[in-house]
Image (cartoon, rainbow, N blue to C red):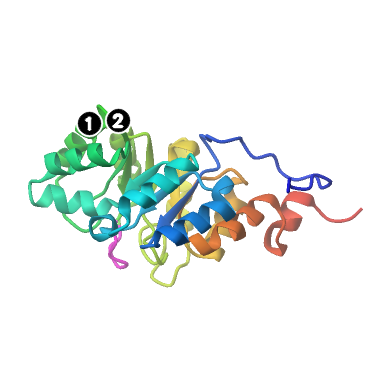
Amino acid sequence: MPSPDFLDLPARPPKPRARGLTHVIDPGLSARESEGLMDSVGDYVDLVRLGWGTAYITRELRRKLDIYKGFGIPTMLGGTLTELAWLQGKVDGLRRWLDELGIEHVEVSSGVVPMPREEKLDLIRTLATDRTVYAEVGEKDPHALMAPYRWVELIREALEAGATQVVCEGRADGSAGVYRPDGEVRTGLVDEVAHEIDINRLIFEAPQRAQQIWFIERFGTDVNIGNVHPRDVISLETLRLGLRADTLRLFHGAPA
């Protein structure tokens, strides 16, 4: 059944989108769950990240990748797997595996492994020669603080090294990186980063609804949001369109 069209809603770019992206985390879904997810919300998903190192031990991995591909959804392994491959000197093995799987997107992060700055940039340059690279900036330690100017420097360096976009760390539970341990947005940090960097080159991890609302209110319906749990895809899209109380008046105003 086609969607109704009698309401005036914010315009959303058609897929494949360059802005207003929704990056969904697959925390270890079964192939059947992946197919059900795509049947239900595939129109609103722009990329699926196979969280952490789940892809390495998922028995139905190839079947799941085929399902996502069939719906036109690109996939990416979690950055933690890239960090571990680098730590063990197995990046070439990771690249061969990505080729075998037909995965063209890869995340480069250093939130767990203390990867030296130049080595991280070299890794981005290397992988960007034949893949789409998403670089992640920020610490997974909730108590690790990094000055806003340093965030800006690291983001610029990653983009200059060949990253397509930079993911601003928030962890899967929204308790680190651009957030305080209680999930509150570090507003000064985000505003400084957004002032210095093209917002369309940034993806903000925002797994909590309150965090998603904050970013939509701050930057509009087409802000890029990542680490979205499968169960929250429809909820996020309604927030983007003002179909939920939290953002209805933001996009549709008040009655005359």
Residue position marked by numbered label 1 in the rendering: 125
Answer whether residue 157 is visible to the viewer in this image: yes
Task: State whether residue 88 is above or below residue 246.
Answer: above
Q: Residue at x 22, y 31 (%)?
A: 125
User: Residue 226: percent from the left, percent from the top?
Assistant: 45, 52
* Contact check, label 1 and label 2, Cβ < 8 Å: yes
> As shown in the figure, which amino acid type bears the numbered disc 2?
Gly
Q: Amino acid at mark 1?
A: Arg
Report x, y in % for residue 189. 42, 53
Report the magenta residues as a range.
139-145
Q: How many marks?
A: 2
Residue at image position (12%, 39%) is 92
Q: Mark 1 or mark 2: which comes first in sequence?
A: 1
* Relative vertical location of residue 142 with respect to residue 217 in this rendering, above or below: below
Q: Secondary structure at mark 2?
A: loop
**Residue 214 rendering spot, x and y as whole percentages:** 57, 58
Label 2 sits on residue? 162
Task: Give the distance between the C-alpha atoms of the residues marked 1 and 2, in whole angstroms.
Answer: 6 Å
Camera-nearest residue between 119 and 51: 51
Residue extending farthest bottom: 182
Q: Residue furthest right?
A: 256
Secondary structure under tag 1 reads helix
Q: Quadrant of residue 164?
A: top left
Check disc 1: other Cα within 10 Å, few if <14, some if 14-19, many if 20+. some
Q: Where residue 106 sits: x, y (%)? A: 30, 42
| Residue 38 appears left or right of 101 | right
